[in-house]
Amino acid sequence: MIIRTKTADNWFIIILYGKFVVKNLIRIRQAFDEAEKHRHLKTAIDLSNVTHIDSSAITLLANFQKRLLEKGSGSMIFGAASDITEIFSIVGLDKVIPINTDQKYYEKIIQNKF
């Protein structure tokens, strides 16, 4: 798994590549911890390059969103493949974290064009 982070405008962006599964959670959690330090920023989680996701990753995403909301911030998921988005819907994660499928909106965030 490759994890990249960057800031753009009022967003902290976490870009994940590969399998978002239990064996990678410690590294992903470090990126989430870094995002929490930037509590004045919203967090974008880019899953467009994620090939697999398991239940531990879904739990991590839900808990991360809960912590951000408690601190007056929040996150949004971008770029998830349709099968991953469907899983999010089945387990109700889309009720906890906004799942944005508008690629142009995300590209504006990445390119600082807000």
Image (cartoon, rainbow, N blue to C red):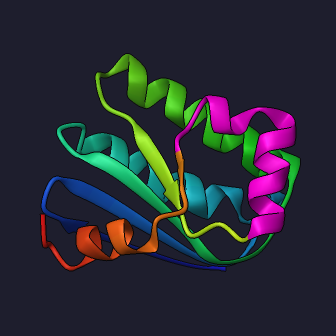
Residue 23 at least partly seen:
no
Residue 75 included in the magenta stretch of the image:
no
Q: Position of residue 78 (x, y in %)?
A: 51, 62
Q: Quadrant of the C terminus?
A: bottom left
Q: Position of residue 38 (x, y in %)?
A: 23, 45
Q: Residue at x 17, y 38 (%)?
A: 40
Q: Quadrant of the N terminus?
A: bottom right
Question: Does residue 4 lie above or below 21 as drawn?
Answer: below
| Overall secondary structure of the magenta section | helix
x then y, percent, for residue 8: 19, 67
Q: Is residue 93 left or right of residue 66?
A: right
- In the image, is 94 to the left or to the right of 111? right
Horizontal relation, residue 58 to residue 102: left or right: right
Q: Position of residue 37 (x, y in %)?
A: 27, 43
Q: Which residues are magenta?
A: 82-98
Determine the residue positioned at 86% across, 46% down: 55
Please state which of residues 16 and 34 is positioned toward the viewer in this rendering: 16
The quadrant in which residue 27 appears is bottom right
State whether residue 48 is above or below residue 42: below
Answer above or below: position of 50 versus 66.
below
Q: Is residue 52 left or right of residue 35?
A: right
Query: Between residues 64 and 51, which one lies in front from this camera angle?
Result: 51
Residue depicted at 26% across the width and 67% down the height: 109
Residue 5, can we see it? yes
Asked if residue 95 is among those painted magenta in the image, a careful observer would answer: yes
**Disc count in the image?**
0
Q: Residue at x 20, y 79 (%)?
A: 111
